Amino acid sequence: MMTTRRSREVDVRTASLQKEIEELRGELGMVQSSSLNAGRKTEPAVDGLETRKLQAANESLRKSLESTEEARHQDAGELAQLQERVRLLQSSLDVLQASSVGLEAERAVLSEKVSNLTTELRKSQDEMARVSARNEELSQEALTKVRYAERQQKLLATDRDVRDILGARSLHIIDVYDVSSQGEFERAFGRIFYTEGKSLIFYAFDLDQQKGLKRGAVFQAWGQKGESKEDPRSLGAFYMDDPAQNRWVLKVDDSKALSRIDYVFVTDGARKEGVRPKGKPLLSAFLNAAANHP
């Protein structure tokens, strides 16, 4: 520390001044002794001159001694001040060290609290993850149940429609097959329940199993008058009725639209219903044959 180094310097200077004072005192004694001896052995004229020289030297030594003594007293005062300052600094250091010990203990307590809180946070996050996973599982179960209920409702509605159609007059039941250019049946096939000018239910199977279909395609039915030059009119899009059988269904209750068509065909669209048919028909059937069920 700067204060300790300064204290050492003052001690060294004080010792040096003390030694110098002792030397000056010895020299002063020698001068005084020489003055006495000279007074006894020399002639009166020489004695007076030598005496004045010795007195002058004595005075110079005395002043030097006084100056040295004054410097020593001053350094002694500085030393006392420095020692007091050292004492105060040491006291402050003791207080700081005690405070440091207290802070270290407090830091250890806080560190333990942080560790405990971190552990609790990790447990809470794990619990939240478990709850979130459970919620997701329950949500999927609920969604599955909702979809099942919707499907059941659609099936019940379809069943009622089929019962009504089966009991209707002028009923056409038409089996539909997609035939390849080689005359072979393709995979997709369907069945139409058609009541003249009143309603139409079109079941289709394996629509999405056709070669070259884009994923997520929308299957759409169109109606057209055989000899008419009118553009085909959209009858709507199929929806999945039974995933287990890969069965799709379309229901049409627009009697006005049905009265103006006698030909139905199915196309696949790019993810949404179109306003005009595109591509090769997947399935097609004529509706103007004679009713085959009373």
Image: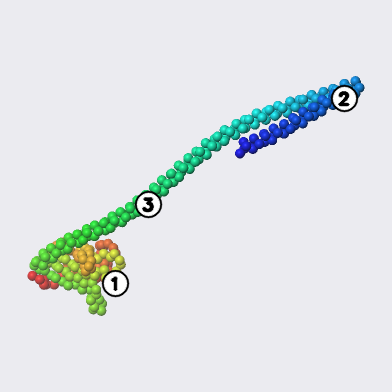
Q: Distance between the residues labelled 3 and 1?
A: 52 Å
| Residue matched to label 2 | 38
Q: Where is residue 144 in the image (x, y as percent from the top left)?
A: 24, 60
Q: Mark 3 points at which residue?
A: 122
Q: Label 2 crowding class (10 Å Cα cut-off): few <14, some 14-19, many 20+?
A: some
Along the line of sight, the residue nearer the viewer: 16 or 128: 16
Q: Image quarter for residue 65?
A: top right
Q: Which residue shows up at 24% across the image and 69% down it?
A: 207
Could you tell me which residue is drawn at 33 percent across and 52 percent down? 128
Name which residue type carries label 3: Arg
Q: Which of marks 3 and 2 is nearer the N terminus?
A: 2
Residue 159 seen by the camera: yes
| Residue at mark 2 to residue at mark 1: CA–CA distance | 145 Å
- Horizontally, is 183 left or right of 101 in the view? left
Q: Report the residue marked by disc 1.
A: 211
- Label drawn at residue 131: none
Q: Residue at x 15, y 62 (%)?
A: 156
Question: Is disc 1 surrounded by few (<14), some (14 to 19) or many (20+) residues within 10 Å?
Answer: few
Q: In which quadrant is the C terminus drawn?
A: bottom left
Q: In this view, does 119 lie above or below 235?
A: above
Amino acid identity at mark 1: Lys
Whether residue 199 is visible here, answered yes or no, is: no
Indicate the secondary structure of the residue bearing disc 2: helix
Which secondary structure lies at badge 3?
Answer: helix
